[in-house]
Amino acid sequence: MRAVIQRVNSACVRVQGQVTGEIGGGLVVLVGIEEQDGREDIEWLTAKIAGLRIFAGGDGAPWARSVVEMAGGVLVVSEFTLHASTKKGTKPSWHRAAKQDVAIPLYEQFVAGLNQFLAVPAATGRFGAMMEVELINDGPVTLILDTKQRD
Protein backbone atom coordinates (compact mmCIF):
# COMPACT_ATOMS: atom_id res chain seq x y z
CA MET A 1 0.00 0.00 0.00
CA ARG A 2 1.40 3.35 -1.01
CA ALA A 3 0.22 6.81 0.00
CA VAL A 4 1.07 10.34 -1.01
CA ILE A 5 0.13 12.69 1.81
CA GLN A 6 -0.18 16.43 1.35
CA ARG A 7 -0.74 18.97 4.11
CA VAL A 8 -3.44 21.33 2.86
CA ASN A 9 -5.31 24.48 3.77
CA SER A 10 -8.36 23.09 1.93
CA ALA A 11 -9.25 20.42 -0.60
CA CYS A 12 -12.16 18.89 -2.47
CA VAL A 13 -12.78 16.10 -4.95
CA ARG A 14 -15.41 16.10 -7.68
CA VAL A 15 -16.91 13.30 -9.74
CA GLN A 16 -18.79 14.45 -12.86
CA GLY A 17 -18.86 18.00 -11.48
CA GLN A 18 -20.36 16.98 -8.13
CA VAL A 19 -18.35 17.42 -4.92
CA THR A 20 -18.05 14.02 -3.22
CA GLY A 21 -15.61 15.08 -0.50
CA GLU A 22 -14.36 18.35 0.94
CA ILE A 23 -12.20 19.45 3.87
CA GLY A 24 -10.70 22.59 5.36
CA GLY A 25 -7.20 22.35 6.83
CA GLY A 26 -5.74 18.87 7.13
CA LEU A 27 -4.44 16.14 4.85
CA VAL A 28 -5.12 14.84 1.37
CA VAL A 29 -4.21 11.16 1.17
CA LEU A 30 -3.84 9.56 -2.26
CA VAL A 31 -3.76 5.81 -1.64
CA GLY A 32 -2.76 3.02 -4.01
CA ILE A 33 -3.40 -0.65 -3.24
CA GLU A 34 -1.43 -3.71 -4.38
CA GLU A 35 -2.68 -7.31 -4.64
CA GLN A 36 -0.47 -8.34 -1.67
CA ASP A 37 -1.80 -5.68 0.71
CA GLY A 38 -3.78 -6.71 3.76
CA ARG A 39 -4.88 -5.87 7.30
CA GLU A 40 -1.31 -5.35 8.57
CA ASP A 41 -0.62 -2.77 5.83
CA ILE A 42 -3.84 -0.92 6.66
CA GLU A 43 -3.12 -0.87 10.40
CA TRP A 44 0.44 0.39 9.95
CA LEU A 45 -0.43 3.03 7.36
CA THR A 46 -3.49 4.46 9.11
CA ALA A 47 -1.63 4.74 12.43
CA LYS A 48 1.35 6.36 10.71
CA ILE A 49 -0.81 8.92 8.88
CA ALA A 50 -2.82 9.75 12.01
CA GLY A 51 0.36 10.23 14.05
CA LEU A 52 2.50 12.23 11.61
CA ARG A 53 3.59 15.45 13.32
CA ILE A 54 3.54 17.77 10.33
CA PHE A 55 1.49 20.69 11.67
CA ALA A 56 2.65 23.66 13.72
CA GLY A 57 1.97 23.68 17.44
CA GLY A 58 0.00 26.34 19.28
CA ASP A 59 3.27 28.05 20.15
CA GLY A 60 4.23 28.17 16.47
CA ALA A 61 6.76 25.35 16.77
CA PRO A 62 6.93 23.55 13.42
CA TRP A 63 6.30 19.81 13.17
CA ALA A 64 4.58 19.68 16.55
CA ARG A 65 1.07 18.28 16.01
CA SER A 66 -0.67 15.53 14.07
CA VAL A 67 -3.88 15.87 12.09
CA VAL A 68 -5.61 14.12 15.00
CA GLU A 69 -4.25 16.60 17.58
CA MET A 70 -5.36 19.57 15.50
CA ALA A 71 -8.74 17.97 14.69
CA GLY A 72 -8.04 18.51 11.00
CA GLY A 73 -9.85 16.99 8.07
CA VAL A 74 -8.65 14.14 5.89
CA LEU A 75 -9.62 13.63 2.25
CA VAL A 76 -8.86 10.11 0.95
CA VAL A 77 -8.68 9.50 -2.81
CA SER A 78 -8.02 6.11 -4.42
CA GLU A 79 -5.05 6.34 -6.78
CA PHE A 80 -4.05 3.10 -8.55
CA THR A 81 -1.51 5.03 -10.65
CA LEU A 82 0.77 5.23 -7.59
CA HIS A 83 1.81 1.69 -8.51
CA ALA A 84 2.75 2.48 -12.10
CA SER A 85 5.82 0.79 -13.49
CA THR A 86 7.72 2.96 -15.95
CA LYS A 87 10.83 0.79 -16.39
CA LYS A 88 10.10 -0.16 -20.00
CA GLY A 89 9.13 2.24 -22.73
CA THR A 90 6.97 5.29 -22.25
CA LYS A 91 3.61 3.67 -21.46
CA PRO A 92 3.15 2.93 -17.75
CA SER A 93 2.18 -0.57 -16.67
CA TRP A 94 -0.35 -1.05 -13.86
CA HIS A 95 0.36 -4.73 -13.15
CA ARG A 96 1.23 -4.03 -9.49
CA ALA A 97 -2.06 -2.29 -8.74
CA ALA A 98 -4.77 -4.49 -7.23
CA LYS A 99 -7.84 -5.29 -9.30
CA GLN A 100 -11.13 -3.81 -8.08
CA ASP A 101 -12.38 -7.02 -6.42
CA VAL A 102 -9.34 -6.91 -4.11
CA ALA A 103 -8.81 -3.15 -3.95
CA ILE A 104 -12.32 -1.93 -3.11
CA PRO A 105 -12.66 -3.87 0.18
CA LEU A 106 -9.12 -2.87 1.19
CA TYR A 107 -9.81 0.78 0.34
CA GLU A 108 -12.99 0.70 2.43
CA GLN A 109 -11.10 -0.94 5.31
CA PHE A 110 -8.38 1.72 5.00
CA VAL A 111 -10.93 4.56 5.26
CA ALA A 112 -12.65 2.83 8.21
CA GLY A 113 -9.29 2.28 9.91
CA LEU A 114 -8.32 5.91 9.48
CA ASN A 115 -11.70 7.01 10.81
CA GLN A 116 -10.94 5.25 14.10
CA PHE A 117 -8.36 7.97 14.77
CA LEU A 118 -10.30 10.98 13.51
CA ALA A 119 -12.84 13.21 15.26
CA VAL A 120 -14.64 13.78 11.93
CA PRO A 121 -14.91 10.94 9.38
CA ALA A 122 -12.62 11.19 6.37
CA ALA A 123 -14.06 12.69 3.20
CA THR A 124 -13.57 10.56 0.10
CA GLY A 125 -13.70 10.49 -3.64
CA ARG A 126 -15.41 7.62 -5.46
CA PHE A 127 -13.36 4.49 -6.03
CA GLY A 128 -12.62 3.84 -9.70
CA ALA A 129 -14.19 7.07 -10.94
CA MET A 130 -12.49 9.81 -12.93
CA MET A 131 -12.01 12.52 -10.31
CA GLU A 132 -10.92 16.12 -10.16
CA VAL A 133 -8.93 16.84 -7.01
CA GLU A 134 -8.50 20.47 -6.05
CA LEU A 135 -6.26 21.47 -3.16
CA ILE A 136 -4.27 24.29 -1.68
CA ASN A 137 -1.04 22.71 -0.48
CA ASP A 138 0.25 24.16 2.79
CA GLY A 139 4.02 24.51 2.86
CA PRO A 140 4.19 22.73 0.52
CA VAL A 141 4.44 19.58 2.61
CA THR A 142 4.21 16.30 0.68
CA LEU A 143 5.23 12.87 2.02
CA ILE A 144 5.29 9.41 0.45
CA LEU A 145 4.69 6.33 2.60
CA ASP A 146 4.93 2.74 1.40
CA THR A 147 4.03 -0.21 3.62
CA LYS A 148 6.62 -2.33 1.82
CA GLN A 149 9.38 0.19 2.73
CA ARG A 150 8.87 0.84 6.43
CA ASP A 151 12.51 1.54 7.28
Image: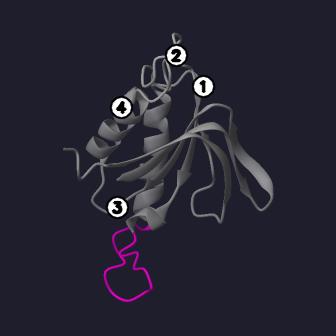
**SS class, disc 2:** loop
Residue at the extreme bottom of the image, as rendered: 89
Q: CA distance from mark 3 to mark 2?
A: 39 Å
Asked if residue 77 lies in the magenta stretch, the reply is: no
- Residue bearing mark 4: 47
Q: CA distance from mark 2 to mark 1?
A: 24 Å
Q: Quadrant of residue 113?
A: top left
Residue at the extreme right of the image, as rendered: 17
Query: What residue is at 50 percent from the left and 22 percent from the top?
Result: 56
Q: What segment carries the magenta color?
A: 84-100
Q: CA distance from mark 4 to mark 1?
A: 16 Å
Query: What residue is at 63 percent from the left and 55 percent from the top?
Result: 126
Q: Earlier in the sequence, mark 3 or mark 4?
A: 3
Task: Find residue 82 and report its horizontal and vertical position in percent.
Answer: 43, 63
- The answer to whether 62 appears left or right of 74 in the picture is left
Query: For residue 26, which numbered disc appears in the image?
Result: none
Q: Earlier in the sequence, mark 2 or mark 1?
A: 2
Mark 3 or mark 4, whichever is nearer to me: 4
| 10 Å crowding of disc 1: few (<14), some (14-19), many (20+) | few
Q: Quadrant of residue 42?
A: top left
Residue 34 drawn above or below residue 136: below
Query: What residue is at 63 percent from the left and 31 percent from the top?
Result: 25
- Residue bearing mark 3: 34
Residue 131 drawn above or below residue 43: below
